[in-house]
Image (cartoon, helix red, strand yellow):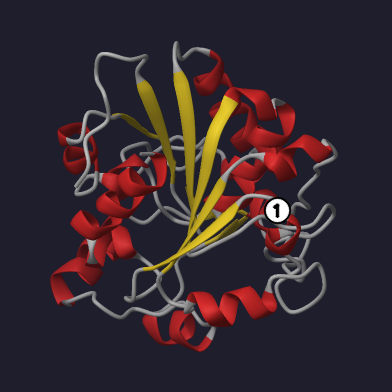
Amino acid sequence: MNSHDTSAQPLHVVLVPGFWLGAWAWDDVVPHLEAAGLVPHAVTLPGMDPASTTQDRAHVTRDDHVDAVAQLVDGLDGQVVLVGHSGGGPVVQQVADRDPARIERIVYVDTGPLVDGAALSPDLPADAAEVPLPGWDVLGEDGSSLDGLDDAALARFRERAVPTPGSVARGPVHVSNPERLRVPTTAICSSIPSAVLAELANPGPPLHTELGELTDLTYVDLPTGHWPMFSRPRDLAAAVVDAVS
């Protein structure tokens, strides 16, 4: 793993998890980033704290999630890299849209940016206040591969998972700053090979992604399931370090 020059400005790596996850999802990745001289910040988004029993997820919005990450970035002194996994991908996309010049690189982990107006779960009923973690078979049928996760990892995931706010899942992404498309970007492909993703990287269905519109995009293959922070944490950290080196 390459090391970042610690004599330079600190390089902050903001780690945004996907649905059902909090900062804990990055526990096995963070030490490897620190060992490489990076300064990681694992994020628990509003309403997603597994230790809280008083969260009102019915009123948490996509803007709340974007605001939380943007405020963290605003308080950092030094260079900033945004890492978004799964549902966290559109969150970091929107943060970068607000101030593209502040972001050194975006790293998408088995995810990507959506086109303006698209949503991750557009068909979710309006009265669904939250989205609990589905059964493993349902996740598999929806394309979220569990490859690489043993029974212990699945049990930990299930125990700590928190329902995602419904408003976040069905809320559309809003982006408008064309400079976001010029932020250097790495797409780490774990459940979909890069060759396949590159063919699908267009604004239309099925992904409705703007990956194909980015001017500086690097694909990296890390074959495993949809949750490489659980199945291949050291290798995921190495891929992030390589991306920012």
Residue 125 to residue 28: above or below: below
Rendered location of residue 37, percent (x, y): 22, 28
Left or right for 195, reference 200 = left
Residue in the foreground of this view, choosing between 154 and 185: 185
Specify the quadrant of the image occupied by residue 96: top right
Identify the residue shown where x is 63% and y is 28%.
67
The residue carrying pointer 1 sits among few (fewer than 14), some (14 to 19) or many (20 or more) residues within 10 Å by Cα, namely some
User: Which residue does the image show at 33% across and 48% down from the upper left?
Assistant: 242
Query: In the figure, is residue 11 to the left or right of 98?
Result: left
Q: How many numbered dots are placed on residues in this image?
A: 1
* Location of the C terminus (image quadrant): top left
The percent position of residue 85, horizontal first and vertical second, equals 47, 54
In this rendering, the answer to whether 66 lies above or below 161 is above
Q: Position of residue 227 (x, y in %)?
A: 35, 65
Residue 118, image x and y in percent?
Answer: 79, 60
Residue pointed to by mark 1:
214
In the shown orientation, is residue 4 left or right of residue 83?
Answer: left
- Closest to the observer, 235 or 149: 235
Tell me the SS state at disc 1.
loop
Q: Residue at x 38, y 44 (%)?
A: 22
Residue at 76%, 68% in the rendered image: 208
Q: Amino acid at mark 1?
A: Leu
